[in-house]
Structures are given as structure tokens and as C-alpha cells.
Image (spheres, rainbow, N blue to C red):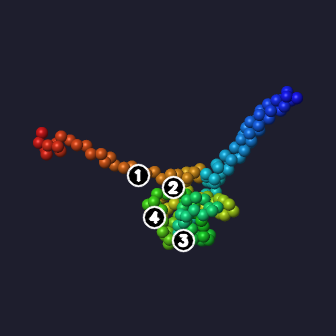
Amino acid sequence: MNCVRSMKRVLLFAGLPTALLFAVFTIQPSAQTASRHTLHGGYDRAHELTLNGTIQAAISQRTSGRPVGLHLLVASPQGVVDAHLGPYLTKDTQESLRSGQAVQIAGAMEKIHGRNYLLARQLIFAGRLVTVRSERGLLLRAQPLARPNTSKTTTRVELTGGAL
């Protein structure tokens, strides 16, 4: 009797980790696919379009179901379009985008949570060209401006007032 009970325990303890490993390996690939989709939203360069319009509003507040980051509502001949610019624009660029301003946006349309968004790749406004996404549709982080070297080098001439 003890032998049967011991055998059941061994099978239980051997089967439980096996079942957990099976669950991890079957669930993980679908989770990776979902995260890859949200990173670049299935951007299709072959269907890229150029939209000319006027900025109605710049929205930076997070709203449920909407991709994270700055959105521009752009009035165009095709109607009002929600252009997603992402979270990585510099503060200077964000502050430069104003209502009533003419804008040209190159990007691809994508349906996310049942709504259409123009995933902006490039933005032209006020004589500026801003690249938001790579050609594959991946959001680009703004590169900080290179700081000039501010370390002071002291020379002997400075210390002695010019006399050596």
C-alpha cells in the first residue's frame, strides 16, 4: 500500500513541473507575437500615404484604447485624421505643433482597437522635417543635442595674468 502511495507522489511531483513547462512554452510565443504587433502596429510601407492638412488639436493625454504618445487631429480633404506621433518627440517639437498650423504627414493607416490611426513616419511643418518612425515603422527616440565641451582648461598664461 505504501509503495502505491509513494508512486502516486512521485508521478504527481514529476508531472506538475512538466505540465508547467508545457504551459510556459505554449503560451509564450503568442504573447511575443502580441507585443511585437503593438510595438510597430503592422506598419505597411507599401501602403504609405501623404496627408496634407491643418492641425485641429494636439493630444498628449493617455486615453484607454489609444496608442501611447502624442496624437494630432488633422483636418484634411479626407476628413479628420488621428495621426499617432508616439511618445518620443522632443519637448521643443511638441510645443511647436499648434492648432491652425499647416502640416504634411507621411505614414501608413492602421486599425487599432477598431479605430483608424495614421502612424506618422515623417512630419513636415513650419519648414521643419521630423522623422518619427523608421522605414519599417518602428518609433525612433529623439537624439539629444550634443553638448559642447564645457570643461574649462586652465593655462599657465591665465594663472599668471599673461606673464610667464
Q: Which of marks 2 and 1 is nearer the N terminus?
A: 2
- Choose the circle earlier in sequence order: 4 or 3: 3
Label 1 sits on what residue type? Leu
**Residue farthest along the top direction in this orientation:** 3
Residue type pointed to by label 4: Glu
Say which residue label 1 marks.
145
- Marks 2 and 4, the one that precedes in the sequence: 2
Disc 3 or disc 2, which is closer to the eye? 2
Check if mark 3's residue and mark 2's residue have beta carbons within 8 Å.
Answer: no
- Give the Cα separation between the discs numbered 4 and 1: 17 Å
| SS under mark 4 | helix
Q: Name the residue beneath numbered marker 2.
A: 88
Look at 44% across and 63% down and name the residue there: 127
Q: Find the distance from the CA under tag 2 to the CA under tag 4.
A: 13 Å
Q: Name the residue under label 4.
A: 95
Three-letter residue code for mark 3 = Gln
Q: Is residue 23 above or below residue 111?
A: above
Dot 3: element: strand
Split into 4 quadrants, where in the image is the C terminus? top left
Residue 43, picture quadrant: bottom right
Q: What residue type is labelled 2?
A: Tyr
Q: 10 Å neighbourhood of mark 2: few (<14), some, or many (≥20)?
A: some
* Residue 107 visible in this rendered orientation of the protein: no
Q: Quadrant of the N terminus?
A: top right
The label shown at residue 56 is: 3
Foreground: 160 or 3?
3
Decide: few, some or many residues near mark 4? Use Cα within 10 Å; few <14, some 14-19, many ≥20. Answer: few
